Amino acid sequence: MSRASVVPVSVDFAQTERFRYVLRLADTSLILGQRLSEWVGHAPALEEDLGVANISLDLIGQARMLLSYAGEIEAAGRDEDQLAYLRDQNDFCNLALVEQPNGDFGCTIVRQVLIDVWQLELLSWFDASTDQRLREIAAKAVKETRYHLRYSSGWLVRLGDGTEESHTRVQTSLNDLWKFTTELFTPDEIDRLAENAGVAPNLNVLRGSWLHRIDEILNEATLTRPDDVPYVWFGKRGEHTEYLGHLLSDMQYLQRAYPGVTW
Amino acid sequence: MSDERQHWPLFEVFIRARAGLEHKHVGSLHAVDAKMALEHARDVYTRRMEGVSLWVVRSADITASDPDDADAFFEPAKDKIYRHPTFYEIPDEVKNI
């Protein structure tokens, strides 16, 4: 056996940082999956109900794989369920964008496009990650995400290039949500360490490809990209907006009220 | 607002379960156009690995036989049993048929 195969490739990306990095990805998928599930029974059409529910289930599936992996890295005996249901708001490190309320259907679609492109670019990059588990998880998730973007971008084009009313609504949502995209590409210590270890991409490079695709979609949807705001919300550092707590109380209620309950 | 804007048109959905099989009608759904109908069909009808290929067609584009015409359309075939291959006896000498 060669020396390279026994020594971990990324020795400098320690257990704690790797745990945090994977947990961020997991929480982002989990919280978005939970948010989207709020549409079940309320979507504008039966067919959209199933469409959104499918995406929600994909995301929760991705979250399960990532949370399990995070639990293994942490090696403190916490499994996916404990990580999902028994952490408090400040321990969640999802991007603040995904905890934002659904708003109207157009607002949900805008949020979805912004995050779908981010996920697609990131998951595609993971194919070259030094982290084997992330490579494996991404290989499965990227196919799902490709469909998510097809769905969300299709709707954004319809609504943006639709009626005056639908155009105004999605443009307003885009203007409101744009400030939360700054966080996606603002690296902190963990992002830098992950990049140096070859686990994650350079966020500036990622932003370039994200922006390119976003501009294409916005252009087709006849929407205007808002100006960047020097405003950074660090959901990934546990600094959340007022909306996450309410979402968690909904999501975690059963396990909090009846600890360890199964069915 | 036109009726079509308020009520999405109906599409019929056909699924090919496996390569080599024919597409079979499985149901219908509403969508604004064929592209969306295909996505809805994927979301509504293929959640449990039901197929490998989808067709959608606007229900309005299907011309159907009128049940009132059943007498003229289908009754005449009833007594023509010689149209079934099993009506004919194959001589023993004929192989591979």
Image (cartoon, coloured by chain):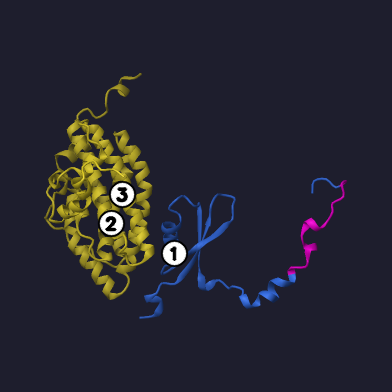
Chain colours: A yellow, B blue
Of residues B59 and A212, the one nearer the viewer is B59
Q: Which residues are magenta?
A: B77-93
The residue pinned by badge 1 equals B37
Q: Position of residue A244 (x, y in %)?
A: 16, 53
Q: Are marks 3 and 1 on the same chain?
A: no
Q: Position of residue A236 (x, y in %)?
A: 17, 46
Residue A139 belongs to the span the image colors magenta: no
Image-based side of A3 in relation to B92, left or right: left
For the residue marked with disc 1, what is the amino acid? Ala
Which amino acid is tagged 3?
Answer: Leu
**Closer to the camera: disc 1 or disc 2?**
2
What is the CA distance from the residue labelled 2 to the residue labelled 3?
A: 9 Å
Contact, CB < 8 Å: mark 2 with mark 3? yes
The answer, for residue A220, to whether it is visible in the render is no
Q: Which of the 4 image quadrants contains residue A203?
A: top left
Using the image, determine if residue B23 lies above or below residue A18. Answer: below
Q: What residue sits 21% from the left and 33% below the top?
A: A74
Residue tagged 3: A59
Pointer 1 local density, CA inside 10 Å: few below 14, some 14–19, many at least 20: many
The CA distance from mark 1 to mark 2 is: 21 Å
